[in-house]
Image (tube, helix red, strand yellow):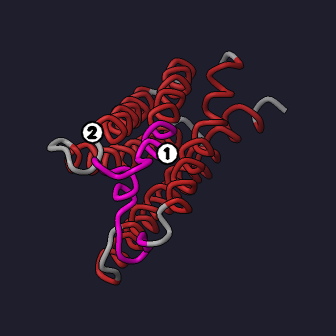
Amino acid sequence: MKKSPLWAGILSPPLALGGIGAAIIINRSWWRLTNNAISDLGKVGLPYNWVMNVPLFISAVLAIYYAVGLFNELKNTVSKIGIGVFITALFFLVGIAIFPEGTKPHYAVSWGFFLAGSVGFLITGIGLWLEGQRKFGAFTVLLFIVEVLLARWAFNAFKGVAVAEFIGISAIIIWHYTLLWETFFVKKS
């Protein structure tokens, strides 16, 4: 993979998390992790909603650039299908930034991101397992199971969905950086 898509993959998650973090700080007078959704920080009509939405948009575009480069590196059809689903999730992430809370498409693009992101990483992990990367495949399946169980618990335990959303985001980011490390740094050394 060329260096520019690789750098895009490295920088994308901190950019999105930085925007979310800044929006939390700006809105700390009313926003609560256990009572709100992350999307509340970017909703229509909220002053400074761009603080979250702009970095989210840029992060998603960088991640798409990286994932397309990764797609071209993969050999296994199942892995390619998984990354294709994951790229679809990233387009849903672009949709979250373009259609913030308070617009009709927001609910669909938000769910689309979390579902396609998780299913995409699961399919990719299974594909890599079939390719012989057994440890990474097992790690992926275990991460997916833990994510689903913790997110389900969070949906039932809290009034808001932000905890469940952060669980999903964390699983996707952990998987992303583990894959990036295994694919581009461990194998090269």
Front-most of 4 and 120? Answer: 4
**Which residue sits furthest front?**
47
| C-alpha separation, residue under disc 2 versus residue under disc 1 | 15 Å
Residue beneath label 2, please? 99
Front-most of 71 and 93? Answer: 93
Front-most of 39 and 179? Answer: 39
Q: Amino acid at mark 2?
A: Phe
| Element carrying mark 2 | loop
- Residue at the spot x=34%, y=83% of the render? 157
Q: Position of residue 48 (x, y in %)?
A: 44, 47
The answer to which image quadrant residue 186 occupies is top right
| Element carrying mark 1 | helix
User: Which of the two discs, 2 and 1, labels the residue nearer the N terminus?
Assistant: 1
Residue beneath label 1, please? 51
Label 2 crowd bin: few (<14), some (14–19), many (20+), radius 10 Å: many
Q: Position of residue 96 (x, y in %)?
A: 33, 42
Total residue callouts: 2
Q: Are marks 2 and 1 in contact (CB under 8 Å)?
A: no
- Residue at the spot x=39%, y=50% of the render? 47
Part of the protein shown in magenta? 30-56
Picture layout, residue 9 above or below residue 49:
above
Based on the picture, tell me whether residue 49 belongs to the magenta stretch: yes
Label 1 crowd bin: few (<14), some (14–19), many (20+), radius 10 Å: some
Picture layout, residue 56 above or below residue 66:
below
Judged left or right of residue 145, residue 112 is left
Picture layout, residue 117 above or below residue 62:
below
Q: Amino acid at mark 1?
A: Val
Q: Position of residue 97 (x, y in %)?
A: 37, 39
